[in-house]
Amino acid sequence: MTYPTYAPSSRSYDPGDWPVKTFKALDGVEVRILYGNRRASSTFSLSYQNLTDAEAQEFLDHYDQMLGTFTAFQLPVSVLKGWGGDLTPFEPSSSLRFRYKEPPKLDSVKPGVSSVSISLLGVLS
C-alpha cells in the first residue's frame, strides 16, 4: 500500500543539516569536521482536516503496513500540492525516504469526520 494521496491541509518541512562534528579546544579554538555530503535528520509534519472516517483509516492502515516506525517509504508528490519550490528531494529518483516518527494522531471532529496529524523522519537510502 502506498501512502494516501490526499493533499494535506498544512505541512511543515525541516530539511535537516549536514552532519558536522564540532571540537573546541581549551583556548576556545573551534574545529569543525564535515562527515557527509548530504543533509540528514529532516522532518516532515502533515495535517489533514475534515477527512471522512474511511479516509482517516487509510493513514492507520498505511502505518500498520509500514510496521509502525520501522519501514521507510516514498511520499507521493500529491502531498506537496500547492508548493512552488524545488520538488527534487521528493522525486522517486531521490535518495530521500520517510518513516513514521510516531503513530498518526486522529481527532474526531464530529460523527463521520476526522482530522489526522502525521509526523515523519527523513531517511537517506
Image: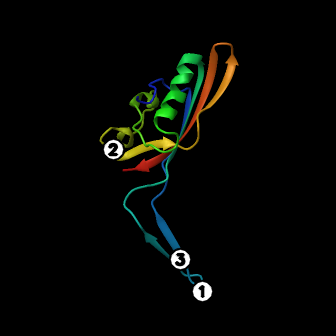
- Residue at the disc numbered 2: 94
Instruction: Give the image location of residue 110, x and y in percent.
Output: 70, 15
Q: Secondary structure at mark 1?
A: loop
Callout 1 environment at 10 Å: few (<14), some (14 to 19), or many (20+)?
Answer: few
The image's mark for residue 77 is none
* Residue ID at (39%, 46%): 96
| Front position among marks 3 and 1 | 3
Distance between the alpha carbons at the discs numbered 3 and 1:
12 Å
* Residue ID at (56%, 83%): 25
> Which amino acid does the dot numbered 2 rest on?
Ser
Q: Is residue 41 left or right of residue 74?
A: right
Instruction: Name the one closer to the observer, 46 or 88.
Output: 46
> Which amino acid does the dot numbered 1 rest on?
Asp
The part of the image, by quadrant, that contains residue 107 is: top right
- Residue at the disc numbered 1: 27
Instruction: Name the one closer to the observer, 3 or 33.
Output: 3
Callout 3 environment at 10 Å: few (<14), some (14 to 19), or many (20+)?
Answer: few
* Residue ID at (60%, 86%): 27
